[in-house]
Structures are given as structure tokens and as C-alpha cells.
Image (tube, helix red, strand yellow):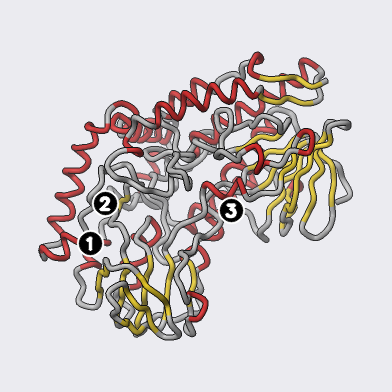
Amino acid sequence: MSTRPGITIIGSGFAGLGMAIKLKEAGYHDFVILEKGHEVGGTWRDNTYPGCTCDVPSHLYSFSYELNPNWSRMFSGQAEIWDYLRACVAKYDLEPHLRLGTRVSELEYDDTARHWRVSIENGEAFTTNAVVSGGGALHVPSFPAIPGRESFAGPSFHSAEWDHSVDLTGKRVAVIGTGASAVQFVPQIAPRVSQLHLFQRTPPWIQPKPDFVFSTRAKRLLALPGAARTLRTSIYWAMESLAMGFAVDPRLMKTHQRAALYHLTSKVSDPVLRAKLTPNYTIGCKRMLLSNDYYPAMVRDNVEVITDGIREIRENSIIDSTGREIEVDVIVYGTGFKVTDTLKDQRIIGRNGRKIQEAWQDGVEAYYGITTAGFPNLFFLLGPNTALGHNSVVFMIESQVRYVLDCLRLLSRTKARAIDVRPEAQRDYNDRLQSRLSRRVWNEGGCNSWYLDEHGVNRTIWPGFSFEYWARTRRPKPEAYELIL
């Protein structure tokens, strides 16, 4: 690269674009956005599977300063959200800052020069004062370690890399996994395939989705001054109330569990199938899902729910744990993403040549999910323990963006070259965080979710209300940081 930007943003999803917008607003124009893809959008560019929608209402799953009164429905689909992000790029004139098709291969901090060296996969490199990692966690597909997976002769793909060239009409399709993506695409493909074999390891808790189309009149009303803001605020507090069971007492989740059980019972009359679809863990310890058409898809004659494990995959079939051979034409993996490993696998070298893997050898952690000791001027958006199980992560992103800007302002005021969180501040914060998490729903009810790392430690979820996180990140505490001159 020919320029040396003051600030480098990695990723162009909600996090990266939100950071860029607020940098410009604060008067920082010397920045670049590096995007590995050839278009902006992050997960909303990549995930194009049938039925892909957000499970947070659109008026809340959007920037608070860029409200859209014209959302087509309460829960908008992938294409509409992607359009929203591209519209933000145009409105805030971010195009000149974008470097598309640019994948970062390594970040290395120079202790003497007090800057970061950013290496690009194509061999180029440049230096920058600060790095904001906005790559997110839901972008590296996770595949199960099933013997023979590579030997399958027919088409096979992950839901996040949907192969639209494969016509599923009349095909025998195996779907492995029953997470959030599968709950959306299975009802879409079930009517087209000849047979759908759904391999389920753990059934999800599913509640009805309060979705509806906004009429033209409703959109006109929402365009009135304050109307969209009022709706957004109402949705926020309604969703925030769900955190009572997360943040206060897991027993408060029983109401949600009863609602989910009623939804299942009302849609699935067959007691054998209903038993297969009934979770045996406390609701909320895994991601709660919303769907009106998943259970109706389960009762179709051409859909089979298989709860036996998979022993191996062969050239044209799948062998389950009982030895039964099931012939299939296509395999679709709805097996989620590598969440806790996404950050840990990056090549980041901090102070004194310390690699991020060394810093996180006991588990991925950061101070408020944003800064990590030993890595000055490196900020994470949607970093460790900042995801939510009940509300919009865009709200969390905005809180983190504000925090990063305050850190940059602190550098400007003090004339320091870099800012690094103190190890003792990070340790104290994470000890208290994990103590809270150990008493919450994610660690109860025999639950093993993608929220947990290989040691069973929750490195993903924020344990409280989102407004609490907002309040705690209102201002960086100068005493928690070392200012490097």
C-alpha cells in the first residue's frame, strides 16, 4: 500500500463501518478499512442461504443514528440488511477509505516506533498507529470432525457458503446440524427435496417469531418525526427484559420455556417426533431461536429427524451410529462457526514479540472485550464476552466504538503514542466476569454450547443487561491503562 493510515479498521460489517462512521464524525479522516471480500457487508454479504434473516427486529438491528423507517418487515432478510449497510457506505462517503479484496495476514507491534506493521496476504505491508479489529466472530464456518467427510462424491457445502448452483429439487438431502441457520433454511428447502434427513445432535428451544410485513401506511407513520425512534426504544426495552433470566436468576427463564413448549406441542402432535424435538437443557443456555415454520417442516412426510450420531460419511451415503446406511445426494452443513477460535487463530504479535496465542494460552479474554494487555493501540469490536443472547449486538458495537474513540482522545490529550491496558486491570475484570457467568444460565442445565471454549469456559457472552455494558464503557478509566510516550 502506498499510504500510511493513522488508523486501520479490519472488516466492513456493522462493526467496521460503525467505527468508520464515528471516526469521520469525530474528525478522524486518516483511516483505512481493510475488507477481505470484494464487497462490504460481512456476515450479511456472505450468508445467502434460503430464508436467511436476522432474529433481532430490524428497527433495533441497525445504527441508532441511521434509522430506517422503510424496513419491509419486522425481521428483515439478508438482502435488505446488506442493502442497508451499502447505503451507509454511500451516505457517509466511506468508499475512499475502503480497500476491498485485502486480507490481513499478520499484525506486528514495533516497540521502538510505537506503531503496528500490517501485512497483507498479497505480500504488501504498511504501518499504522492503531488497529481496530471489526471482523466479528460469525464468519469462519465450522465443520464437524466426521470420518470420511472428504470422501463424499456429491455436492456438499456449509450454510454460510451456500452453493446456489446446486439444484436441490427432487434430491435426497442430508442436513447436519439444527442451529440458527438450519432452522431458517430447512423450511425453505423441505418442500423442494424428495427426502430430507435432518441429523440433530441437540434440539434447539424455539419460540414463535413475531414477524409481520410493514404496510405502506405503517411506513409513512414511521417516517414521522420521532416515530421510528419510539418503536426502536420500545423494542429495545422489550428485548432487554428477557435478560432477567440471564442476568438475575435462571429460574426466571421458566416462562420462556413454557411458551416454547406450548409452541412445540401446538405444532407437533406426534409424541415420538415431539420427544425428539424437546430439549433437555434449561432454555437460554444455548441460543434461543425464533421460527414459525420450522416445526411445520418437521412434520412433513419427506422429512426425517435423526437423533443417532454419525459414524462416518461414505461416497454416496451417511452411516449413523446404529450402523444404518442412508443414501443421500447432497449434504448441507448447518454446523455454525468457529467463534472462540476466530481471534485466537490470528497472527498478532504484540509488545516484546509476544504472540496473541501466548497471551491467551489460558483462554481468550480482553478488558471489556475491547483491549488486551500487551497489545497497545489494538482494539477489538465484538471481542471476547461481548455477544448477547437477548438483544442487538449493534447496540454493543456502538458502545465499543464510543469507548475506542475516547481512548484515542485520551492519547491526543496526553500526547502519548500508545495506550495499553494494565494486566492487573484485565485480570481483575475477567475474574469478576467469569464469577458472574458461573452463576448464570449458560453454565447450568447440562448445557454445552458454542458460547463455551474447549475448557467449558464462557468466552462469548456478556453476563448482564446491555445497558449495564453501555454504562460501564461510558468512559475509559485512565488508571486501568498504561500510556506509552
- The kind of residue on which mark 3 rests is Gly
Q: Position of residue 113 (x, y in %)?
A: 88, 32
The mark that comes first in sequence, 3 or 1, is 3
Q: Position of residue 91 (x, y in %)?
A: 64, 44
State the residue position of label 1.
295
Question: For the point 57% across and 25% down, which residue is it?
Answer: 427
Residue 206, label in figure: 2
Question: For the point 43% across and 44% down, which residue is it?
Answer: 451
For the residue carrying disc 2, how many other residues have a C-alpha within 10 Å: few (<14), some (14-19), or many (20+)?
many
Q: Secondary structure at mark 2?
A: strand
- The kind of residue on which mark 2 rests is Ile
Question: For the point 73% across and 30% down, which residue is it?
Answer: 376
The mark that comes first in sequence, 1 or 2, is 2
State the residue position of label 3.
41
Residue 228, label in figure: none
Q: Nearer the viewer, residue 301 or 82?
A: 301
Tag 1 and tag 2, C-beta contact below 8 Å: yes
Q: Nearer the viewer, residue 439 or 184?
A: 439
Q: CA distance from mark 3 to mark 1?
A: 31 Å
